[in-house]
Amino acid sequence: MEEHGWTKYFDVDIMDASGPDMVLDIPNGLQIKKNYVGKNLANYDSMLVLSHFKGHAMGGFGGALKQLSIGCASSYGKAYIHGAGDVNQDMFKTEQIKFITAMGDAASSIHKYFNGNIAYVNAMVNISIDCDCDGNASAPCIPNIGILASTDPVAIDQACIDIIYNSTLPGKDKLIARIEEKLGVNIIDVAFKDGAGNKEYELIKID
């Protein structure tokens, strides 16, 4: 953070810089029953989740729900989610649907923790099939579409997926193939079943 100049202009809180982790219970979780997050989450009573909507090599796509799950998880929590509840599991060998389900469970716990004091922004710009964290990511295959905002993480991710599937944009087939290969949309179904939001929405365009 210091090397990139962030601390010069902002008070930066690296949520999981030190333990012990904060543990959120997920009593009705479909794959995991606990979520391990940075302990400093307890210092905040609201959250703004800003996500770059794009594809992802492991999750199929990254949006609000992935940001809630992997983004808020501690180092241990990330391993726990990737291992679908088993930190000793090789994350590259975890059954894909179990990993996606664990992400949905974890995401729902963060959304519920803030109890309405949370909002989401998904930027559908420079959309690649890969994540920004990939040092050798594929070039963007879909041009800028726009920015979506919501207080519902399920609805905003569902809306982004629907926009991609219903578009006539060149390059969408490449992204859809990545999403379907990794069973990506299942994170939306899991979060919905966990009670984190609704898949039905009204899309209001603001010029």
Image (spheres, rainbow, N blue to C red):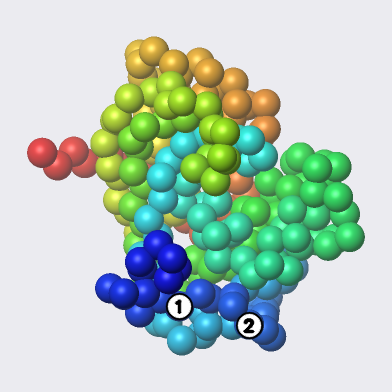
Q: Which residue is mark 2?
A: 18
Instruction: Rate crowding at label 2 as few (under 14), some (14 to 19) or many (20 or more) other CA atoms within 10 Å.
Output: few
Q: Give 6 or 34, whichever is nearer the viewer.
A: 6
Residue appearing at x 29%, y 30% in the figure: 145
User: Where's residue 162, x and y in %?
Assistant: 42, 30
Judge whether residue 151 can be spotted in this image: yes
Is 60 on the left-hand or right-hand side of 149? right
User: Where's residue 113, x and y in %?
Assistant: 51, 75
Q: Give 39 or 179, whichever is nearer the viewer.
A: 39
Is 38 on the left-hand or right-hand side of 7? right
Inter-mark Cα distance, 1 to 2: 11 Å
Q: Which residue is mark 1?
A: 13
Q: Residue furthest right?
A: 88
User: Where's residue 129, x and y in %?
Assistant: 53, 29
| 125 over 192 or under it: above or below | above
Q: Give 157 or 146, whichever is nearer the viewer.
A: 146
